Each structure stands twice: as C-alpha cells, then as structure tokens.
Image (cartoon, rainbow, N blue to C red):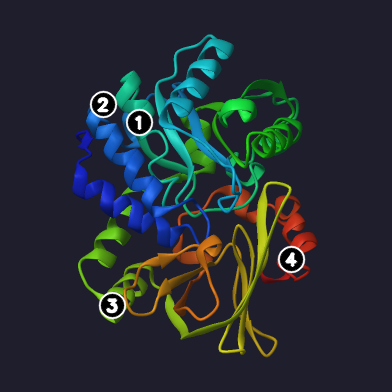
Amino acid sequence: MPKIKLDEKMIEYAVYGGAVLGGGGGGWIEEGLKIGRLALEVGQPEMLTIDEFEDDDLLVTVSMVGAPAAKDQFVKPIHYAKALEMLSQKIGKPIKGLNTNENGAGTTVNGWFQSAVTGIPLVDFACNGRAHPTGAMGSLNLSELDGYVSHQSAVGGKDANYVELSISGTLEKAASMIRKVSVEAGGLVAVARNPVTVAYAKQHGAAGAISQAIEVGRALLSYKGEAAIESVVASLGGKLITAGTVTDFQLETTGGFDVGTVQIDGAYEMTFWNEYMTLEKDGERFGTFPDLIMTLDAKTAKPIVTAAVEKGQQLAVIAVPKEKLLLSSTMRNEKLLKPVEDIIKKSIIAYL
C-alpha cells in the first residue's frame, strides 16, 4: 500500500474519532487538533501500514502520561521531540517507525509532530486501539517477557516544574517512575518508550488503529446531533445505552490519575479511572472495560471526556463490546486488569 498522506481533514477525523475511542480518556480534542495542525505546519507526516516494514525494524511508542484534569500540566510539542531524541540516544539503534500508545483525542495524533520534525514515518498502529489508564496496559504485554529491560524518556512541565527523565529498568518500575515524574511536572509528560521489533508489535498490538479512528471520526463529523451519534454507534457496532442529565459527578485527581463516578438521571452509574470502566443500572452491567464506554453531548454529539463532565450536562452514553474493537494482548492480561478493581471497587475480570 502507498503512504497515507495526512492532511487537515484527516487530522480532524483522527482527533474526533480518537476522542470516541478514548472511552473518556486519551486527552483533549483541542490539544489533539493543535498538535496535528502544528505537525502540518512544520512538515508533512506520512503514515505507513505495519506491513510495509521489515520484521526486525524497530518501532518506538510515543505517548502522554498523566492526569488530563491536572491544573498545572504543561506539555509543548518540543517536549515530544525531546523525549524521542533522548530515547534514540539511549538505545543507539535506528528507529524506523513511530506509533502511539492508544487511540484518544490527543493520543491518536501522538507522533505526528515527531514524524514531521524527524522524517521518521508514522505507523498505522497503536499499542492499544482504545485508551486505557496504565502504562503497562499500553506496553504490548512486554511485562510478561522475562528479563525485558524497558527504556523510557519523559519531558514536561515549565519553570520550576520542568523535568527531563531517562530511565531503564523493569517495565513496572520504569512506568511507575514515569507516572511519578508526571506528577512532579505538574500532571503531564511527553514520553518515548519501549522499542520493539515490528514482528513483536504485530503479534501484540492494534494494527490499523489510526485508520479506524479516522473512519470513526468521518462517521461522526459527516452528520449532526443525534444522527451523528447513530452514525458512530453503527460504525463501531455498538449501542446507544441512554441519553439524559448528569445528576451527580465525582472526580478526584490522585497519583497521576483522574478517578470518579458519573450518574445519569440518578439511574445509570459509570465509574472511571481516566477512562470509563463500568456502566451499570440497578446492578445490571451494560459495559465493562475493555468494552468501550463513552459519553457524547446529547445535542451536538461532541465527545465528552471524563475530566470535562459537569452536573446538569445532557449526555448520550454509548457502549461497544470489546469483541468489536482493535485491542492489544494486554486487554486479556488479568494481572494488568486487577488494579482496575482495586481502584474502582467493582468487578472487572469476571466480565472478561
């Protein structure tokens, strides 16, 4: 297949479609559009399918880590490029492609700016085809490889909060340190991490994830209002579960995550840990992570992330079964899903 040339319209589709696949997390629409447009200003990022690489080519994941609602977050495009440069120096081998960790409004366009600046191509691939809370969930099940050394670089913050970190260690230790650094930097850092071969990436990640986000965005933006919501649900093979008023909303930013609950019409309750984790009514479960649960403005169909929910909003709630999504092998790893239960105090693994 030829290279996919990314243009202004594609950025819009990718960001809005990514916002839906973000499942309540994955960054902000405005930030995603800004980064995508900036990429086009500084160069011409191009995207290749993963099949256009050799099996032993090295791919690097670029991502953001932190809590989208953090008040003092400060990440600029140059921070993304700096993190990649630090990792490249560390590993001392050529990086042949860049991929994002997940689909989300901000995360789907992770790497577009770095690609425009460096000329390293983007890959139509994400570690996970939907957004997820922990770094380990976006690390292609490398946590299961004995002796694997994770190399990660992080940059973010401003003035007294500015931080650069390069770390090597177990995946768990490295991801934990990056999360802590995001807190020190004011809530968010740009990260480059975990070089893997194309052969390994194909086995464990979500090939075609960026194309999927673009198609979902096209489905959303080709219509308006309720018709747009119906179009998105149809494109993903999901369901509109309910539409109503936010009657209660609780959010606490702790340990670099946004954690809380949303109630619709006092009946439906959603828990979230950055992303929506469960959707229930009277004890009946309508969606369980890694199923996709997402909120959209009931009138405009604009995707609404968990950090932007407010009491009194009119929201539509959609759910897409995990079987219909492009997912990483991490989404079947009970060890990685167990922390979700500890945070939200609800059963997750029983619904796998």
Say which amino acid is labelled 4. Ile
Q: Circle 2 — which element? A: helix
Q: Circle 1 — which element? A: helix
> Mark 3 near mark 2, Cβ–Cβ under 8 Å?
no
Q: Between disc 4 and disc 1, whose residue precedes? A: 1
Q: CA distance from mark 4 to mark 1?
A: 35 Å
Please tell me which residue is depicted at 35% across the width and 52% down the height of the picture. Answer: 15
Q: Circle 3 — which element? A: helix
Q: Between disc 3 and disc 4, whose residue precedes? A: 3
Say which amino acid is labelled 1. Phe
**Which residue is label 3 attached to?**
225
Between 226 and 231, the residue placed more toward the observer is 226
Say which amino acid is labelled 3. Gly
> Mark 1 near mark 2, Cβ–Cβ under 8 Å?
yes
Q: Position of residue 60 (x, y in %)?
A: 49, 27
**Badge 2, how many Cα within 10 Å: few under 14, some, many 20+?**
few
**Which residue is label 2 attached to?**
42
Please tell me which residue is depicted at 30% across the width and 26% down the height of the picture. Answer: 116
Please tell me which residue is depicted at 58% across the width and 12% down the height of the picture. Answer: 90
Between 66 and 52, the residue placed more toward the observer is 66
Which of the 4 quarters of the picture holds residue 314? Answer: bottom left
Q: Quadrant of the C terminus?
A: bottom right
Q: Between disc 3 and disc 1, whose residue precedes? A: 1
**Badge 3, how many Cα within 10 Å: few under 14, some, many 20+?**
some
Q: Is residue 179 visible?
A: yes
Q: Between disc 2 and disc 4, whose residue precedes? A: 2
In the picture shown, does residue 266 fall above or below 341?
Answer: below
Q: CA distance from mark 3 to mark 1?
A: 31 Å
**Which residue is label 1 attached to?**
113
Please tell me which residue is depicted at 39% across the width and 72% down the height of the picture. Answer: 237
Q: Which mark is residue 344?
A: 4
Labels 2, 4: front one: 2
